[in-house]
Image (cartoon, rainbow, N blue to C red):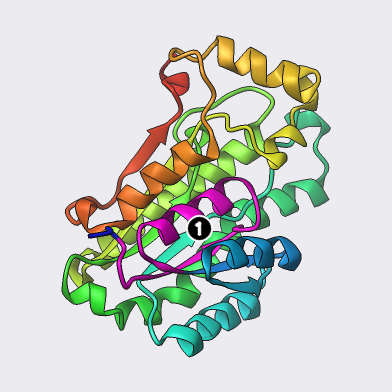
Amino acid sequence: MKRLQDRVALVTGGASGIGAACARRYAAEGARVAVADIDRDGAQAVARDIGGIALACDHTQAADGAQAVAAVLAAWGRLDVLHANAGVGWTGRFDATDEPTMRRVFDGVLLGPTLMARAALAALRASPARQADGAAILFTASGLGVHGRPMISLYSAAKHGVVGLMRSLALELGEENIRVNAVCPGVVDTPMVRATTGGWGTPDEALEMFRRVTPLRRNSTPEDIAASAAFLVSPDARNITGCALLVDGGAHEA
């Protein structure tokens, strides 16, 4: 039996990259999937591929999150998995980052997932899965949420906040059988990463540099992250909560 058979999942940032790969993997595992993204056209393309629904959603706006959850409940009557994946990219040197960029990073990386978790909580509490092996919240954090690196300080600080939120919510919601975890990618070849590697040369040069310093000598793919995410939201992980799972080829141990 597929691990997510009859479950309903909402994935933010699902139009491309890691979010799209996770939406596809959840659907392959049997879930009905709502693909939410500020890029409505991209979300519709993914949703068509997997038989899901597409939702226009800016996760930094509380009303958008509430509307997305309401749309899922209207379509399928339940929500079992929230994957708060949407975010923004790296920002470069700390002393060269202006205040509007700082606010954009903290809103996109930390505030958005926080608002989505709050928007989804009542629906997750009503999930039939909670009475079995658990409803689930999964955050896409980062290896930079548990380690630091130069040139990425604001992004790293915001992702540390995501990991802190995850750990606290895991403790707060554990007695309700709502599991809260985070998947922490290393460098993944996605459109967002390619758009934010200017401090290390061209995108291809930057990705090659990161590959060379990764112990497994490979960068992750979106599908690598999706495989780990599918495990964390599935019944196979029913006794796992408060986990920040590094999926980075060992990069953040090097």
Q: Position of residue 167 (x, y in %)?
A: 34, 51
As helix, strand or loop, the secondary structure at mark 1 comes to helix
| In the image, residue 94 above or below residue 254 | below
Badge 1 is on which residue? 23
Asked whether residue 98 is in view, the answer is: yes
Nearest the viewer among 216 and 119 is: 216
Could you say where residue 238 lies in the image, as x and y percent from the top left? 19, 56
- Residue 158, percent across and down? 58, 45
Identify the image quadrant of residue 123.
bottom left
Q: Is residue 167 left or right of residue 145?
A: left
What residue is drawn where x is 49% and y is 89%? 74
Number of disc labels: 1
Along the line of sight, the residue nearer the viewer: 52 or 205:
52
Which quarter of the rendered picture does the C terminus lie within? top left
Residue type, numbered disc 1: Ala
Q: Which of the pair 9/103 is nearer the observer? A: 9
Badge 1: residue crowd in 10 Å (few <14, some 14–19, many ≥20): many
Q: Is residue 90 magenta?
A: no
**Residue 68 sits in quarter:** bottom right
Instruction: Reply yes or no: does residue 26 show up in magenta.
Output: yes
Q: Is residue 22 left or right of residue 127?
A: right
Where are the magenta residues, as a range?
Answer: 4-32
- The residue furthest top is 212
